[in-house]
């Protein structure tokens, strides 16, 4: 009995030593810093929010740098993400006047972000910590900031637009991109557009990799079941567009197509969910064209999915898109889609199989909408074709985890 007690005591002591006195090796997490101007409504902003929600916290210590404390998606940032807000900077009056003059005259046709950084970049502070991996999750301002003001062992730059059509000048951006170890485009089209601007091709001397914007399809479909208070006009054909209210989204085409539909006697209710710099001009055009009851601006909202489900057709009337995340979300909800013929539309839509691709003008958009109004069986066909839409989340996370490791 004494031997048994002694043996039990020894085993208990060994276990105590193992549990409390011997320090087990800890997994060293890779420190990540994502930077983006804001988390307002937008494809890049939504994609980053979903990414932050799905990153493996056992592998990464995640930091986020924002330049605005306001944003639709800020409440959705996971609590384990450490958020930093760059303090407001005082912009010199002379430079503010110069920037306004540029916006009015578009001097040299530089992109506004390039001109802004030229005038105000020196006013921004350096990020106070060194990190393992820094990710500038957009072209333009945060790319310039990351190149100059962030210290990291590895730097990655995201391109989530059609770089050429957005109006960037490669000869201005080239020195900044030399600070990055790799460049990530959100689609093959975005990659080709970006690379085409750097001539000769070896001028860039950087790897450009394609990683799509991440979509959490299960989350989208779950949130689409939320109730909504909006009163739809049951007798109207219901269209919906979700986008940032900016000119590249083609809302001028959409508005003219809506006007033509009304003039032709069609009852239309076209919902637009979003906010942005084109809001005031768009509101004036709606009044001028007497479309107050037909073309409805509902503002930005974190969950547009129930509105998409309740509509008959999703419309993406853009002049260009880097990826087109809102269009993919509509596909995940099995909606019939009409898109203009920007390159990335063809990554999702097979014309007359699961949607329609129209030419980039109001008349073509008008004709595509009439095509579906007059053929409801076609809408059903497109909806059934979208049922096979599958999530890219698993593949994108695998790509990102490999890329983001030290």
Image: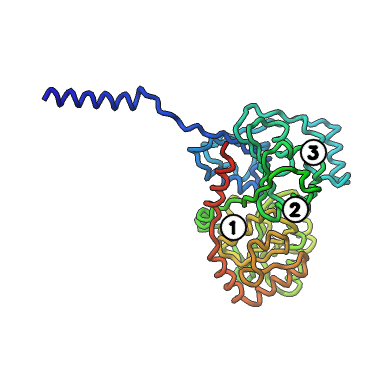
Vertical relation: 406 (above or below) 293: above
Left or right: 23 in relation to 52: left
| Mark 1 or mark 2, earlier in chain | 2
| Mark 2 or mark 3, earlier in chain | 3
| Pointers 1 and 2 in contact (C-beta within 8 Å) | no
Instruction: Measure how far apart labels 2 and 3 are at the Cα level.
Output: 23 Å
Count of marks overlaid on the render = 3
Measuring 62% from the left and 33% from the top, which residue is drawn there? 84
Q: Is residue 245 visible?
A: no
Numbered disc in front, either 1 or 2: 2
Residue designated by label 1:
329
Q: Tell me if mark 2 has few (under 14), some (14-19) or many (20+) residues whose alpha carbon lies within 10 angstroms of its own.
A: some
As helix, strand or loop, the secondary structure at mark 2 comes to: helix
Measuring 86% from the left and 42% from the top, which residue is drawn there? 102
Of 143 and 223, which appears nearest the observer?
143
Q: Position of residue 52 (x, y in %)?
A: 56, 43
Measuring 35% from the left and 22% from the top, which residue is drawn there? 21
Instruction: Measure how far apart labels 1 and 2 are at the Cα level.
Output: 24 Å
Q: Tell me if mark 3 has few (under 14), some (14-19) or many (20+) residues whose alpha carbon lies within 10 angstroms of its own.
A: some
Q: Position of residue 109 (x, y in %)?
A: 86, 47
Q: Is residue 182 visible?
A: yes
Quadrant where the image shows the N terminus? top left
As helix, strand or loop, the secondary structure at mark 1 comes to: helix
As helix, strand or loop, the secondary structure at mark 3 comes to: helix
Q: Position of residue 33 (x, y in %)?
A: 61, 35
Q: Position of residue 70 (x, y in %)?
A: 65, 40
Of 232 and 157, which appears nearest the observer?
157
| Pointers 3 and 1 in contact (C-beta within 8 Å) | no
Disc sitting over residue 116 in the figure = 3
Of 33 and 94, which appears nearest the observer?
33
Residue designated by label 2:
193
């Amino acid at each position: 009995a004494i031997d048994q007690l002694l043996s039990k005591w020894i085993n208990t002591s060994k276990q105590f030593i193992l549990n409390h006195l011997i320090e087990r090796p800890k997994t060293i997490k890779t420190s990540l810093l994502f930077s983006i101007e804001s988390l307002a409504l937008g494809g890049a902003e939504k994609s980053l929010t979903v990414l932050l929600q799905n990153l493996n916290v056992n592998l990464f210590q995640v930091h986020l740098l924002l330049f605005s404390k306001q944003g639709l998606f800020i409440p959705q940032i996971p609590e384990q993400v450490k958020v930093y807000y760059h303090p407001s900077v005082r912009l010199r009056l002379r430079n503010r006047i110069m920037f306004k003059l540029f916006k009015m005259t578009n001097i040299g046709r530089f992109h506004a972000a390039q001109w802004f950084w030229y005038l105000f970049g020196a006013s921004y502070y350096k990020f106070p910590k060194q990190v393992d991996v820094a990710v500038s999750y957009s072209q333009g301002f945060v790319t310039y900031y990351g190149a100059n003001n962030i210290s990291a062992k590895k730097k990655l730059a995201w391109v989530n637009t059609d770089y050429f059509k957005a109006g960037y000048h490669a000869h201005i951006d080239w020195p900044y991109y030399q600070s990055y170890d790799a460049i990530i485009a959100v689609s093959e089209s975005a990659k080709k557009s970006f690379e085409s601007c750097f001539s000769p091709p070896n001028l860039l001397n950087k790897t450009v990799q394609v990683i799509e914007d991440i979509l959490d399809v299960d989350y989208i479909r779950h949130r689409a079941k939320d109730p909504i208070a909006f009163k739809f006009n049951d007798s109207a054909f219901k269209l919906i567009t979700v986008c940032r209210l900016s000119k590249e989204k083609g809302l001028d085409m959409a508005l003219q197509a809506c006007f033509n539909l009304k003039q032709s006697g069609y009852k239309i209710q076209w919902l637009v969910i979003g906010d942005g710099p084109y809001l005031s001009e768009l509101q004036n055009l709606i009044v001028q064209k007497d479309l107050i009851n037909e073309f409805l601006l509902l503002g930005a909202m974190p969950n547009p999915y129930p509105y998409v489900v309740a509509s008959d057709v999703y419309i993406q009337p853009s002049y260009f898109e880097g990826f087109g995340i809102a269009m993919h979300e509509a596909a995940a909800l099995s909606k019939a889609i009409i898109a203009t013929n920007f390159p990335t539309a063809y990554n999702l839509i097979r014309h007359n199989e699961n949607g329609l691709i129209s030419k980039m003008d109001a008349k073509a958009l008008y004709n595509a909408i009439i095509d579906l109004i007059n053929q409801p069986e076609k809408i059903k066909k497109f909806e059934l074709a979208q049922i096979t839409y599958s999530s890219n989340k698993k593949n994108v996370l695998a790509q990102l985890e490999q890329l983001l490791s030290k």
